[in-house]
Image (spheres, rainbow, N blue to C red):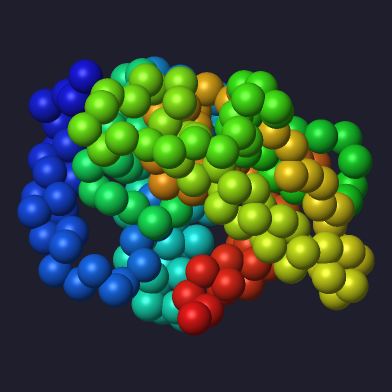
Amino acid sequence: MIRNTKFTFFLLILLVFTKIDSKQLFIMINPAGHAKNIGRKLVEGYERSVTFKMAEVLKQKLEERYGIRCVLTRYPGEEIVDLQNASFANRLGIDFYLDLRIYRQEFIKPKIFIYNLVFNPISDFATRVFDPYKFIPINQAHFFNINITKSYGLRIKESLTKKHNKRNFDCFGVFGVPLRPLKGIIAPALCVEIGICDQEQWKNLTEPIVESLGFLVEN
């Protein structure tokens, strides 16, 4: 499942040092698309390149403003195989996983949707006691932090729906859906999907998203 690439080598090296500062928050950002998946067609270009540009900006801002340690799931030209991101996320012991997606819409005002992984809204949220010595199926990994994940999504939405943000974009969610890119991840994991009608609109949305993640460093 783990491919022999420069990016894989980088993550394995990072794994060695990941426990050096256990107090520093660790986030993984997954920009949709990869070398063999260009994603959806946007105004100009495709989802793959725009999500990567936005992820890079988010990474820089989160590191500079909050001192959060961030890592992207891929480099340009990197191919991602099924469950590779989940494997890395679990091995690195991240604190939060953000899946970033962008699509083209006809509306001028951008839209942001927030999703978390839910297969069954009744059974998934049931109270459980986990045995650390027993194997947990991939489809149940999100059970560990499902309530925390939902609360994170609500905190992000609360920030994104503040009065000064409503003038610039609309935010919807949190929607629990069987979202495959979040499967197998133990840490709180959310998908943020953005609808834009202009290729450069994403640039105006990075600051609100960074602001919405500020609660992660509040203690």
Q: Going 78% across and 44% down the picture, which residue do you hit?
A: 173
Q: Nearer the viewer, residue 211 or 133?
A: 133
Is the residue 132 above or below the residue 209 in the image?
A: above
Write down the quadrant of residue 127 in the picture: top right
Q: Please report the residue visible at 49 percent of the width from the left and 45 percent of the height from the top.
A: 145
Could one spot residue 6 in this view of the protein? yes
Q: Residue at x 63, y 72 (%)?
A: 211
**Where residue 69 sits: x, y (%)?**
33, 66
On screen, 93 above or below 141?
A: below
Image spot of residue 93 (x, y percent):
28, 50
How far across and how far down the image is residue 53, in percent? 49, 50
Q: Quadrant of residue 178?
A: top right
The residue lying at 71 percent from left, 56 percent from top is 154
Residue 126 percent location from the top left of the image: 60, 33
Q: Is residue 17 left or right of residue 180?
A: left
Q: Is residue 87 left or right of residue 219?
A: left
Q: Quadrant of the N terminus?
A: top left
Out of 6 and 147, give the one closest to the viewer.
147
- Establish if 189 lies above or below 219: above
Q: Is residue 74 visible?
A: no
Q: Is residue 126 left or right of residue 171?
A: left
